[in-house]
Amino acid sequence: AFSAYMDGAGNIGADGTELWLGVLLGRVDTGNTSGELRVDLERDGSLNVRLNSQLPDTDTHLLVAHLEFNSGVDDTFTLYVDPDLSLAPTGGVSTNVADLSFDQIALSGGVFGNPKIDIFFDEFRIAESATDLGFAAVPEPSTYALFMISIAAFSLGLLRKKVGVK
């Protein structure tokens, strides 16, 4: 299923493709309020890119990463923390990276000063689009154009009826 995403060197990240990663995360309360989650994209056994998110509390959070593998320019990843799934993705923090391609994903985390803290992960998902990950669908521009043409035609019909034009 990932063959369209392979870059020719056995890594996920073919130019012109994009992936969405989502994971629920949390941590056990130890009285320490500083924590971090790390999503590492690795290539050939080495760290390629690290996506960090601070964990200020012990609530469960949704972390979403959007990976765009661009042709001829830097790849882009955008990180969203607790996004509103009823809307299109907004408010993420984007970073450009020369090459985001990877062959392994590692999830890790800890609380500063206490590396033995329990971080838990659930519902790890990989999707081709934001809607596949659970975000609300965003209508195509052509849908908006069709809607506007329909309103204009209806309004013209009402105007012609009111004026008495046949």
Image (cartoon, rainbow, N blue to C red):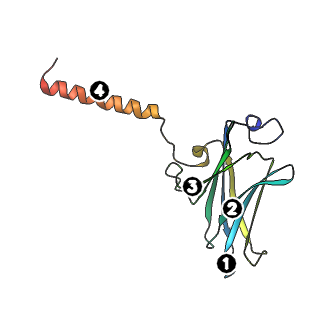
- Mark 4: few/some/many CA within 10 Å (<14, 14-19, 20+): few
Q: Which mark, by number, is residue 92?
A: 3
Q: Which mark, by number, is residue 29?
A: 1
CB of mark 4 within 8 Å of CB of mark 3? no
Residue pictured at 75% horizontal, 78% vertical: 113
Residue 144's spot in the image, x, y percent? 41, 35
Badge 4 is on which residue? 153
The CA distance from mark 1 to mark 3 is 27 Å
The CA distance from mark 3 to mark 2 is 13 Å
Residue 106's spot in the image, x, y percent? 78, 57
Q: Which mark, by number, is residue 52?
A: 2
The CA distance from mark 1 to mark 2 is 20 Å
Residue pictured at 49% horizontal, 50% vertical: 87
Where on the picture, by quarter, is residue 60? bottom right
- Mark 3: few/some/many CA within 10 Å (<14, 14-19, 20+): some
The tag earlier along the polypeptide, 2 or 4, is 2
